[in-house]
Image (tube, rainbow, N blue to C red):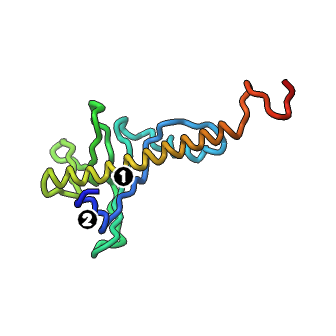
Amino acid sequence: MTATQNTFNSIARIHITKLRATTTTTSAKNRGQDKDRKARRAWPTNKLAEAEIEFTDGFLAGHTLRGFTVWQRQDGDGFFVTPPQRSYEKDDDKRYHSFLVYKNEVVRDQFQDLVLDEYRRVIAQRAASAESAEAADATAQPTDDEPSDDQPF
């Protein structure tokens, strides 16, 4: 962990609040997830997740800054993070007002690395839990090819 991560982690935590749905399910058990996935179909194709920062120390303790977005680059090579922002029109031109202004590019890159590290951690954790759930399902239910103990050969 770098000094920047240690400093940031002492005053705030990053949470990934929404992830892009990557699979569809049809079982009755997961119908609630299907509704959630349908709601996110309106997401742009390269939007991967939404994140927020929960402040844990200092005068902002207990406050949350929402609206960070994790994107995949258009060329598919890597990710980037946008801070919370609001769009507005001026002279028939769409513009954006950012609620977080970075001091310089180094600070922006360090902050993006913090958010992307959390995004990668959540993705890895979700993949591991999906693999363990698949393994549990595979061992719990006999397949049609394999006879169970109560069926004759």
User: Is residue 61 left or right of 91 when viewed as pictured?
Assistant: right
Provide the residue designation for mark 2: 7
Image quadrant for the C terminus? top right
- Tell me the tag on residue 104: none
Q: In this rendered view, identify the residue nearer to me: 2 or 64.
A: 2
> Residue 118 at x, y = what percent?
36, 52
Residue type indicated by callout 1: Glu
User: Is residue 40 left or right of 63 when viewed as pictured?
Assistant: right
Residue depicted at x 44% and y 45%: 124
> Residue 99 at x, y = what percent?
23, 58
Taking the image as drawn, is residue 86 in sight? no
Residue depicted at x 85% and y 30%: 151
> Residue 53 at x, y = what percent?
33, 61
Residue projecting furthest to the bottom: 59
Residue type indicated by callout 2: Thr
* Above or below, comparing residue 118 to residue 38 in the picture: below
Task: Sort mark 1 into few (<14), some (14-19) or many (20+) by Cα contacts within 10 Å.
Answer: some
Taking the image as drawn, is residue 26 in sight? yes
Answer with the quarter of the image where residue 75 lies.
top left
Answer with the quarter of the image where residue 66 lies.
bottom left
> Residue 126 at x, y = what percent?
48, 46
* Above or below, comparing residue 61 to residue 26 in the picture: below
Residue projecting furthest to the left: 104
Mark found first going from the N terminus, 1 or 2: 2
Provide the residue designation for mark 1: 118
Residue depicted at x 28% and y 63%: 6
User: Is residue 1 left or right of 21 when viewed as pictured?
Assistant: left
User: Is residue 86 left or right of 103 when viewed as pictured?
Assistant: right
Which element type, helix, strand or loop, lies under badge 1? helix
**CA gap, disc 1 to disc 2?**
16 Å
Task: Sort mark 2 into few (<14), some (14-19) or many (20+) by Cα contacts within 10 Å.
Answer: few
Image quadrant for the N terminus? bottom left
